[in-house]
Amino acid sequence: MIGCGIVAGAVRDDPFSFSVTDAQHNEVEILAKREHERWMVERQANGWRYGPHRDNDRKTHPMLVPWDDLDAPSREKDHETIRLIPMILAEAGFHIVRRRS
């Protein structure tokens, strides 16, 4: 989605960082939105649906709404998840590289 790949090996001297050139090209935002969509599909496939309060027994969750309907703190959870990807991959012996066009 953002022109990157994952490769095995030690992190280079210049660690990867996501690009934010403007509001239209904010890689963290792009990937956070996609992660939220992926999470919703996974939850719904397991019988979850929207509810004003999280209820594990009834399988309801207040964040089962489109990205544009999430409040700022809920979006920030997904942003933070994306920001952690380079570190998580490094701990597993991988790093992110930009594909050359």
Image (cartoon, rainbow, N blue to C red):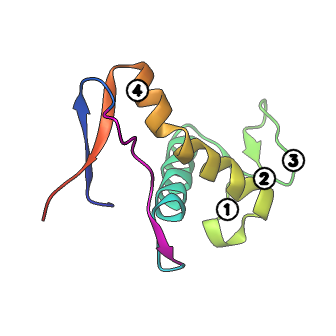
Kindly identify which residue carries mark 2: 62
Displayed quadrant of residue 93: top left
Quarter in which the N terminus is drawn = bottom left
Q: CA distance from mark 1 to mark 2?
A: 7 Å
Q: Earlier in the sequence, mark 4 or mark 1?
A: 1
Instruction: Count neighbours of disc 1 (C-alpha within 10 A) and say few if under 14, some if 14 to 19, many if 20 or more.
Output: some
Looking at the image, residue 35 lies above or below residue 30? above
Amino acid found under the numbered disc labelled 1: Val
Q: Earlier in the sequence, mark 4 or mark 2?
A: 2
Does residue 29 appear left or right of residue 80 in this picture? left
Q: Nearer the viewer, residue 38 or 60?
A: 38
SS for callout 4 = helix
Find residue 81 and report its horizontal and vertical position in percent: 58, 42
Amino acid found under the numbered disc labelled 4: Ala
Judged from this view, the residue extending furthest toward the right is 53
Residue 79 seen in render: yes
Give the mark toward the camera: 4 or 1.
4
Kindly identify which residue carries mark 4: 90
Kindly identify which residue carries mark 1: 65
Q: CA distance from mark 4 to mark 1?
A: 32 Å
Q: CA distance from mark 4 to mark 2?
A: 33 Å
Q: CA distance from mark 4 to mark 3?
A: 36 Å
Q: Give the main secondary structure, helix, strand or loop, of the magenta stretch.
A: loop
Q: Are marks 1 and 2 in contact (CB under 8 Å)?
A: yes
Q: Nearer the viewer, residue 42 or 4?
A: 4
Residue range (magenta): 12-22
SS for callout 1 = loop
Instruction: Count neighbours of disc 3 (C-alpha within 10 A) and say few if under 14, some if 14 to 19, many if 20 or more.
Output: few
Q: Are marks 4 and 3 in contact (CB under 8 Å)?
A: no
Q: Nearer the viewer, residue 61 or 19?
A: 19
Quarter in which the C terminus is drawn = bottom left
